[in-house]
Image (cartoon, rainbow, N blue to C red):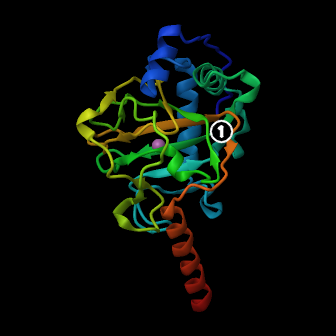
Amino acid sequence: MEPRPTTTFEINLTDDQIAFFLNNGFLSIDSITTDEEVEWLKSVYDDLFNNRIGEKDGAYFDLGGRRAHDGKEVLPQVLGPERTYPELRETTYFMNSRKLSAQLLQLPLDQVNGGGHMILKPAGYGRETPWHQDEAYWNPSVRHHGLSVWMPLDPATVESGCMQFIPRSHLTDEIVMHKHIDDDPLVHGLVTEQVDPSKAVACPIDAGGATFHYCRTLHYAGPNQTDRVRRAYINVMSGPSKKLDKPDVRPWQEEAQQALAKLKTLAREQA
Ligand code: NI
């Protein structure tokens, strides 16, 4: 692995960009880091995916198909890549993700932090990431205040699976009903049907550009119908969360826990 490039890139959001995000729940920018860093990140990214790093600990799995299936993953995901590559927390991408997120969450920098995950859409058969709110995956006992920074390492187009958002969908008090992809609680990915896709705004961007979306914003990324891979590296950045008096009801989370527990019991019985 080449050493991390030390080129930096200074960026601040304008008042108009911040206002757009607060109003619409998403924002797209042309550039969040340098071309040199994008090239270096590709080598880190490819190492993590080619070697399925973290698979035994649940940090590498298929978001769009059953866990630990032995076929080819349709939507492979790496969680917490910083555990393998701590220098990812020192990149211009990470620093800018944190700084710009603080601007968008309207918080001082020292109250905002987070970490990364990576979602790969293989050329030709990478599955769609269906409509969902990120908070549907998260702890139901707290009200989150966070957002995702999404940077592609390859050109992201409608055909390769760029991000799409429902404007103003973040202005809601509720997490809508979700279920697991294919209605299978052993598939990690979630989907909601409470969405009007005709209202979607697609945000095609080049490698090294970025989109931001609030944790309640409904979003989607299409299947990869091109002959090149679509690599995306996401930083989720949050401020302090508020404990709820009563946990939110998210039955899809319990379904997954029960299905996994059943699977473990079955494995024990067969061992
Ligand atoms: Ni998401």
Question: Where, quadrant-wise, is the N terminus in this rendering?
Answer: top right
Can residue 50 be seen?
no
Q: Residue at x 36, y 66 (%)?
A: 183
Residue 5 image point, x, y percent: 65, 21
Query: How many numbered tags mark residues here?
Result: 1
Q: Is residue 165 left or right of residue 134?
A: left
> What is the three-letter code of the residue carrying label 1?
Gly
Q: Residue at x 59, y 91 (%)?
A: 269
Question: Where, quadrant-wise, is the C terminus in this rendering?
Answer: bottom right
* The residue positioned farthest toward the front in the image shown: 245
- The answer to which of 98 and 19 lies nearer the viewer is 19
Can residue 269 be seen?
yes
- The answer to which of 36 and 232 lies nearer the viewer is 232
Q: Dividing the picture into quarters, in which one does residue 117 lie?
A: top right
Residue 86 sits above or below residue 71 on the image = above
Residue 36 image point, x, y percent: 56, 20
- Neighbor class of circle 1 (other Cα within 10 Å; few <14, some 14-19, many 20+) is some
Residue 29 image point, x, y percent: 46, 18
Residue 267 sits above or below residue 231 on the image = below
Q: Residue at x 63, y 44 (%)?
A: 81
Q: Secondary structure at mark 1?
A: strand
- The answer to which of 179 and 142 lies nearer the viewer is 142
Q: Residue at x 30, y 51 (%)?
A: 125
Q: Is residue 55 left or right of residue 240?
A: left
Q: Which residue is mark 1?
A: 115
* The residue positioned farthest toward the left in the image shown: 198
